[in-house]
Image (cartoon, rainbow, N blue to C red):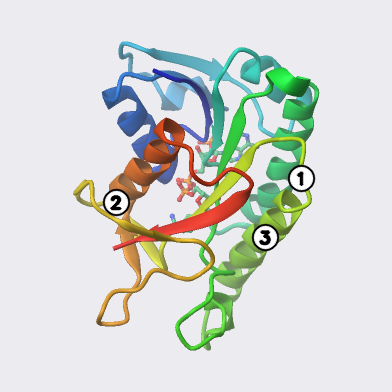
Amino acid sequence: MSKIALFGANGTIGSRVLDEALRRGHEVTAVVRDPAKLTRSAPGLTVVTGDVLDPAFVAEVARGQDVVVSAVGGGDGPGHVATIRPAAESLVAGLRTLGDAAPRLLLVGGAGSLRTPDGSQVWDAEGLPEFLLQIMHAHGDALDFCRTVEDVRWTNLSPAGTIEPGERTGTYRTSLDDLVVTEDGGSRITAEDYAVALVDEIDRPQHIGERFTVGY
Ligand SMILES: NC(=O)c1ccc[n+]([C@@H]2O[C@H](COP(=O)([O-])OP(=O)(O)OC[C@H]3O[C@@H](n4cnc5c(N)ncnc54)[C@H](OP(=O)(O)O)[C@@H]3O)[C@@H](O)[C@H]2O)c1
């Protein structure tokens, strides 16, 4: 059993991570900005209110945890884009203050910077809408920042090219910086199986200090 603080616990991806962690018997402190959006109760679940952009709050909620997971961001507005790299910086700043007692940090990343089979990157594809490009590059910036961090045990997990709510199959494939693609050239994962992969990484750490990705 691990003690997990989860930012973005009421989001599309964060809520699947919450379900997956609770079903495995982990103790989860779900961090939300508006507690009215997360009213469920479950064994092992504590809900607290706070902002990921406040490093002092990050330190407070992270103290005594084994892992801090961040599934923040989301949406397609400028405010969401503006949160992605500052959130990574705030989480690292907060964890740093805990020194050797700091928990691991697991960040939900983006797919844009992944390499495609033709050697380009996902964000090089023609016709991507501007809002999506901004989110992809914000995640790229957050990953670049993580790669400068040596004193916090971070992991960044990029989804496949498409991530949507769907079935929990419990199966997936992983890669480091290469987009995971199927034989037909598609790249997808359900949010449920993404959560399985993320909680597997909590249970059996294999990617400390690096980015990995997951797809079918
Ligand atoms: N869904 C996709 O297709 C997709 C694809 C690739 C990458 N991603 C990335 O995955 C992450 C999560 O995406 P999602 O689709 O699950 O987004 P979502 O459903 O919009 O959820 C985002 C969560 O972030 C929280 N949040 C935002 N700013 C915060 C702050 N300052 N402090 C604390 N919490 C904050 C929101 O809380 P509130 O409810 O309080 O607003 C919400 O719970 C994002 O970084 C997104 O870019 C998503």
Which residue does the image show at 78% across and 28% down from the upper left? 96
| Measured Cα–Cα span from mark 1 to mark 2 | 32 Å
Which residue does the image show at 67% across and 56% down from the upper left? 143
Quadrant housing residue 105: top right
The numbered dot on residue 174 is none
Q: Quadrant of the N terminus?
A: top left
The reply to whether callout 1 and callout 2 are in contact (CB within 8 Å) is no
Given the image, on which type of amino acid does mark 2 rest?
Pro
Give x and y (percent) for residue 161: 42, 68
- The residue carrying mark 3 is 138
Which residue does the image show at 36% across and 28% down from the upper left? 21
**Badge 2: residue crowd in 10 Å (few <14, some 14–19, many ≥20):** some
- Of residues 188 and 8, the one nearer the viewer is 188
Give x and y (percent) for residue 125: 52, 85
The numbered dot on residue 165 is 2
- The residue carrying mark 1 is 149
Give x and y (percent) for residue 112: 55, 69
